[in-house]
Image (cartoon, rainbow, N blue to C red):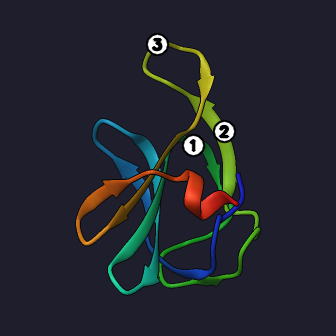
C-alpha cells in the first residue's frame, strides 16, 4: 500500500471497525485513510512522500484480502478519482 500524496502520518495503529489503520494528513484539512492493513511500514509523526510504501494489505471483516481507502476534505468524504489522476 502506497501513499497517494505526501503528508504526515497522523495515526498508525489499531482502530475499531477498520482494523489496522493509517491516516495521512495532507494539509488544508485533507486526509487519506487506509484500513484493514496487514502490516505497517510507517508510524505516527513520520512525513511521507507520494508513493511511499506505508503498509501491506490485510483482511476485511469478511476474511477477504482487502484495503479500505477513503479521502476526506473538510471532514467529508470526497471522490478519490480526482486525487488519483
| First reached walking from the N terminus: tag 1 or tag 3 | 1
Q: Are marks 1 and 2 in contact (CB under 8 Å)?
A: yes
Q: Quote the CA–CA distance across marks 1 and 2.
A: 5 Å
In this picture, is 60 found above or below 21?
Answer: above
Q: Residue at x 43, y 20 (%)?
A: 61
Query: Measured from the top left, where is residue 82 in percent x and y?
Result: 57, 60
| First reached walking from the N terminus: tag 1 or tag 2 | 1
Q: Quote the CA–CA distance across marks 1 and 3.
A: 14 Å
Q: Residue at x 66, y 58 (%)?
A: 84
Crowding at mark 1 (Cα within 10 Å: few <14, some 14-19, many 20+): many
Q: Is residue 72 left or right of residue 81?
A: left
Dot 2 falls on a residue whose secondary structure is strand
Crowding at mark 3 (Cα within 10 Å: few <14, some 14-19, many 20+): few
In this picture, is 31 found above or below 47?
Answer: above
The mark found on residue 55 in the picture is none
**Image mark count:** 3
Crowding at mark 2 (Cα within 10 Å: few <14, some 14-19, many 20+): some
Read off the residue under disc 1: 37
Q: Is residue 79 left or right of residue 73?
A: right
| First reached walking from the N terminus: tag 2 or tag 3 | 2
Q: Quote the CA–CA distance across marks 2 and 3.
A: 14 Å
Read off the residue under disc 3: 62
Q: Are marks 1 and 3 in contact (CB under 8 Å)?
A: no
Dot 1 falls on a residue whose secondary structure is strand
Q: Which is more toward the observer, 30 or 36?
A: 30
Query: Measured from the top left, where is residue 62 in percent x and y?
Result: 46, 12
Tell me the quadrant of the picture where the C terminus can be found: bottom right
Q: In this view, does 45 lie to the left or right of 40?
A: left
In this picture, is 30 found above or below 63?
Answer: below
Read off the residue under disc 2: 57
Amino acid at each position: 500500500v502506497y501513499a497517494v500524496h505526501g503528508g504526515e502520518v497522523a495515526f498508525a495503529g489499531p482502530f475499531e471497525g477498520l482494523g489496522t489503520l493509517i491516516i495521512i494528513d495532507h494539509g488544508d484539512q485533507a486526509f487519506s485513510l487506509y484500513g484493514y492493513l496487514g502490516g505497517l511500514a510507517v508510524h505516527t509523526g513520520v512525513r511521507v512522500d507520494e508513493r511511499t510504501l506505508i503498509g501491506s494489505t490485510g483482511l476485511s471483516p469478511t476474511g477477504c484480502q482487502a484495503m479500505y481507502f477513503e479521502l476526506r476534505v473538510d471532514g467529508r468524504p470526497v471522490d478519490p478519482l480526482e486525487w488519483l489522476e
